[in-house]
Every structure is written in C-alpha cells, then in structure tokens.
Amino acid sequence: MIKTFVAENLKVLRKRRRQTQEEVSSIFHCTRSTYNNYENNISMTPLDILVLSSDYYGITLDNLVKVDLHILNEYQLREILKK
C-alpha cells in the first residue's frame, strides 16, 4: 500500500493558519466531526475536499497527498506552496 500524507498535511496546513477545525469545516461545507475524521485518518478524504483544500491552502494536489509537510521547515514549506 502506498503511504499518503493527506490527514497529517490537512492538520499542518490548518494549524499553520491558526484556524480551528470548526472554521475550516465551515469553509469546506462539512461538519467539524467529519473534518476531524479526515485529519485523524478515520475517514478517507473525498476528492472534492482534496481539491478545495488544494485551492484554499495554495498547494498542489500532488504535494498535498505525497509530501510529508510535517517534517519540512518553514522555508521548505513556503517553497512548495503557491505564491
């Protein structure tokens, strides 16, 4: 099975903006508990939420799924985020 970093990356990106799950879930039109399930890898994040997240956070889908943002420093993170 291929390792993906969606759940971890959603959390990193949300916390980087100092937002709550409640705030982000309202932007993505889902409940806080549903969004919590995505961040904690309890539920698979659907494609529409991945696309919305990519646009909202300014990150490519490829990087959102494949790159472990948790291990990057702030400079490295800024480099992969869209300007």
Image (spheres, rainbow, N blue to C red):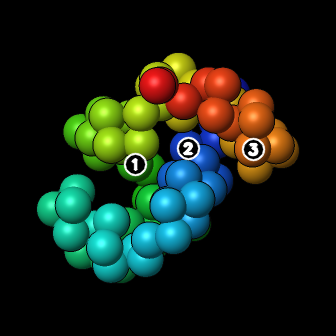
Count neighbours of disc 1 (C-alpha within 10 A) and say few if under 14, some if 14 to 19, many if 20 or more.
some
Q: Tell me the SS state at disc 3.
A: helix
Q: Tell me the SS state at disc 1.
A: loop
Which is in the foreground here, disc 2 or disc 3? 3
Residue that numbered label 2 is attached to: 6
Quarter of the image for residue 2 reads top right
Give whichever of 25, 38 is nearer the camera. 25
Q: Is residue 26 above or below residue 62?
A: below
Q: Is residue 26 left or right of residue 5?
A: left
Q: CA distance from mark 2 to mark 3?
A: 18 Å
Q: CA distance from mark 3 to mark 1?
A: 25 Å
Q: Is residue 30 above or below residue 78?
A: below
- The residue under the point 62% across, 25% down is 80
List x then y, in percent, for residue 49.
29, 45
List x then y, in percent, for residue 74.
75, 44
Residue that numbered label 3 is attached to: 74
Most distant residue in the left direction: 29
Count neighbours of disc 3 (C-alpha within 10 A) and say few if under 14, some if 14 to 19, many if 20 or more.
few
Residue that numbered label 1 is attached to: 45
Q: Is residue 9 left or right of residue 70?
A: left
Q: Earlier in the sequence, mark 2 or mark 3?
A: 2
**Amino acid tagged 2:** Val
Q: Is residue 62 left or right of residue 33?
A: right
Q: Which mark is residue 70?
A: none
Q: Earlier in the sequence, mark 2 or mark 1?
A: 2
Q: Is residue 14 left or right of residue 79?
A: left
- The residue under the point 64% across, 41% down is 5
- The residue under the point 42% across, 42% down is 57
